[in-house]
Image (tube, coloured by chain):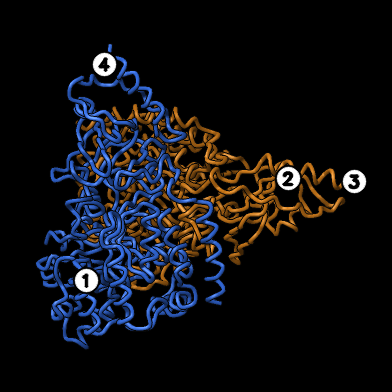
Chain colours: A blue, B orange
Amino acid sequence: MQLRAADRVFLSLALTLSIAGCGSPPAPARSAPQASSTATTDVSFVLDNAIVVTMDGSGRVLSPGSVAVDGTNIVAVDTPEAIAAKYRGRQRLDLAGHIVLPGLINTHTHAPMVLYRGLADDLALSEWLEKYIFPAEARTVSPEFVRAGTRLAALEMIESGTTTFVDMYYFEEEIAKETRAAGLRGVLGQTIIQFPVADAKTPVDALARAERFITEFKNDPLITPAVAPHAIYTLDAASLTAARDLSRRHGVPTLIHLAETRDEAKNAEEQLKLSPARYLESLGFLGPGVLVAHGVWVSEPDIALLTMRGVGISHNPESNMKLASGTAPVPAYLRADAAIGLGTDGAASNNDLDMFEAMRMASLLHKLQTADPRAVSAKTALEMATIRGARALGKESQIGSLETGKRADLVLVDVSGARQTPMYDPVSHLVYVARGDDVRTTIVNGKVLMRDRKVLTLNEAEVIRDARAWANKVRAAIK
Amino acid sequence: MQLRAADRVFLSLALTLSIAGCGSPPAPARSAPQASSTATTDVSFVLDNAIVVTMDGSGRVLSPGSVAVDGTNIVAVDTPEAIAAKYRGRQRLDLAGHIVLPGLINTHTHAPMVLYRGLADDLALSEWLEKYIFPAEARTVSPEFVRAGTRLAALEMIESGTTTFVDMYYFEEEIAKETRAAGLRGVLGQTIIQFPVADAKTPVDALARAERFITEFKNDPLITPAVAPHAIYTLDAASLTAARDLSRRHGVPTLIHLAETRDEAKNAEEQLKLSPARYLESLGFLGPGVLVAHGVWVSEPDIALLTMRGVGISHNPESNMKLASGTAPVPAYLRADAAIGLGTDGAASNNDLDMFEAMRMASLLHKLQTADPRAVSAKTALEMATIRGARALGKESQIGSLETGKRADLVLVDVSGARQTPMYDPVSHLVYVARGDDVRTTIVNGKVLMRDRKVLTLNEAEVIRDARAWANKVRAAIK
């Protein structure tokens, strides 16, 4: 009798907490598996009866599968029967018609630049920067601007299944505050750049700001403060070295743009007689904890060097295409087993923060460029957006896959609509069919940030209203 | 007093018929402009107070603008004030926060292949075709299969803003019946191919079937029947000529795959001593009414030839990338002012029918390949998906832009969400930011097929259920 009563409670919770998408057929009520009366442990919640794409070392896909979460952590990933035998969720979410996957990791963006989304397109890089982006930044970037922009970016990321993002911008401590409030995980780098910018007159000022930022956020459970020397072409050797030293001193990551454009590589070869990667090596810059964005114009020896030094790489296919920067040699990075993740770059050159699109683009682009449809498979693209991205951040023991003991950073994707029908292979589906819009629920560090498309940590209408007000100022700034 | 009463009715209709998206802020009630009591004409409906992207010869964007529709036709496109002075809609749709644009034209697909969406990916073309697609087709293609597949494809196209599509498949008369029932406009080609297929044992059989199909649908307002000789490598010269003769005799379009892969071009050069385009020219095949899909492996003289002959071209960037076929020289086609539209190809090689994604991919791909971010601008990509696509079909006098006298094929796109904020330029926004999911209302030939994401001409749950049942048969067929 006791067992039956427990089952009734279990089922009634399942119905109450069902998060099947509106418009999708109601999730069929599964009969609750027989729970052992002796060994069940109470946990925060059980995500039950989904297709679980774990991205663990063996690439396990459980269909159906369940995930038990307690507090901030995943405590078990197994069949629904095995989970039901061991765990009882204080909440149970029945996920028939959904895929559960690790939260996506965006390894390179400039979050507040969502406020410049579509400000100017289809222009040569120099014209784009000099006539639009730099003047707009000079006249609008402020603590209030980056906070409004980060809120909008956080909304977009939560809505499209990104749970961790890597950022490089100004007033990074303000970005950190908004990221923490939104509940996202962030590796956030304070920009160091040679010329005067909104938050620092000199690199020395910027380094001081970075150090205050590191001290303030060093022990935050969600925020990893970082130092972000902008690039080799916007910093002298002394500033590059000082930035790297600061991050080494505090044991925090170093983020830098590297070998993004042909000009950058050409100028380095001409002026320094070194490739961009070799130049950083000559400064003693490379090592674990360094994450380079783009890595487009690299040779095979550069790739070997970056890999040997344990450097992470962020591949940004859409931005590289839109700005006509070139094609990063991703198949070569993968052959070297480099820690290469995916990024969107800022929304000014993308024009969104959708990591599903980044996966699709990475996969399609390298098939075309190698003339081999087997290059960058769906599985590899999904790895880059999850576990390999985590490796790029040195966080593979905490995030990037659904495994016992890792943080509960999870995304639930609805695959019940017309354009998602039929589904033959969930991994292919996630890359070639799914979009950010299909994410129904986003969980970071065990906390539900979005449930059934409703973001719980931000006021969507207010964030959009503020963003529109800032856009008016941006328009005025470039007139 | 009479005027005021009319105004009251007008406003109350506006509120009743408001189609602003759920979740978006309510459309502010505009004060109805003073209507002249003498000159207003009753029309079916007025789409009011939107951003109207006309794609007419001068690229006019009205912000705000309105469109008056009567019966199947657009009767006026103008400012809200000018429309209100002349027309009174029996329905009025207040579209604050929406873009109105011409319905998108998908110039190449195989609609029923949505049932093979994601069946097999990341494979070399020959393995993909021989191990998966051909066996699956041999065992599943039937009139019932193509009907179920067409319904699913129609649902996806209506939901993503496609109003006209060009199809090449088997049992095309069944596809036509479902297309008509769904309310979409279709240029539908019965396949002619040398080897035995589900609907014809020989090309002669297929030609007889094509002729019956043409006769049956010749005067349909939505369906343009066509003849679709598959390709130069799957048909002998006699069959190619016979297919072209049949379409000439009936004055209907001819659809063919051309120069899709390097192998096709190489074999033509080796065996026929001609490029694929030149070979068709040698058969007297090329001329107005011919639409070639892909056109990847073409020389500048081939492009000049196709353009001179008035041939339409369908560019399919995602399929060409996914199958690693190569990059069509789109900038060269555009320099020649070719009638080049965009297509998705079948969902088995895409894996969706979203023309917004096709626009974005076309724009990004050619920037990268030409190393010029000015190549294929947003405006050009949107032209290819609308008016230039209409030219590729010889239908530019009827569809492809919002102009008086053209058919009312219209799409309403919601741009109020987080990932669409802010908006600086509606044309850039449609290409780099919008997705099929943002389409809220789709109108074809003056008929509303989808309203506020609810498709009115198809039973979504039933269509998806049927498709899943077919997917089970497909799985069994390739075991």
> CA gap, disc 1 to disc 2?
65 Å
Alpha carbon separation for disc pair 1 and 3: 76 Å
> What residue would you read off at disc 1?
A247
Q: Are marks 2 and 3 in contact (CB under 8 Å)?
A: no
Q: Residues within 10 Å of mark 1 (few under 14, many from 20)?
A: many
Same chain letter for marks 3 and 4: no
Chain bearing mark 3: B
User: Looking at numbered disc 2 in the image, what kind of residue is underneath it?
Assistant: Gly
| Amino acid type at mark 1 | Ser
Q: Position of residue A382 (x, y in %)?
A: 25, 50
Mark 2 or mark 3, whichever is nearer to me: 3
Residue position for label 2: B89
Label 3's element? loop
Q: CA distance from mark 2 to mark 3?
A: 20 Å
Badge number at residue B1: 3
Secondary structure type for disc 2: strand
Q: Secondary structure at mark 4?
A: helix
Q: Nearer the viewer, residue B440 or B258?
A: B440
State the image coordinates of residue B412 (x, y, percent, origin top left).
57, 49
Q: Whole-Å distance between the Cαs marked 3 and 4?
A: 74 Å
The reply to whether callout 4 and callout 1 are in contact (CB within 8 Å) is: no
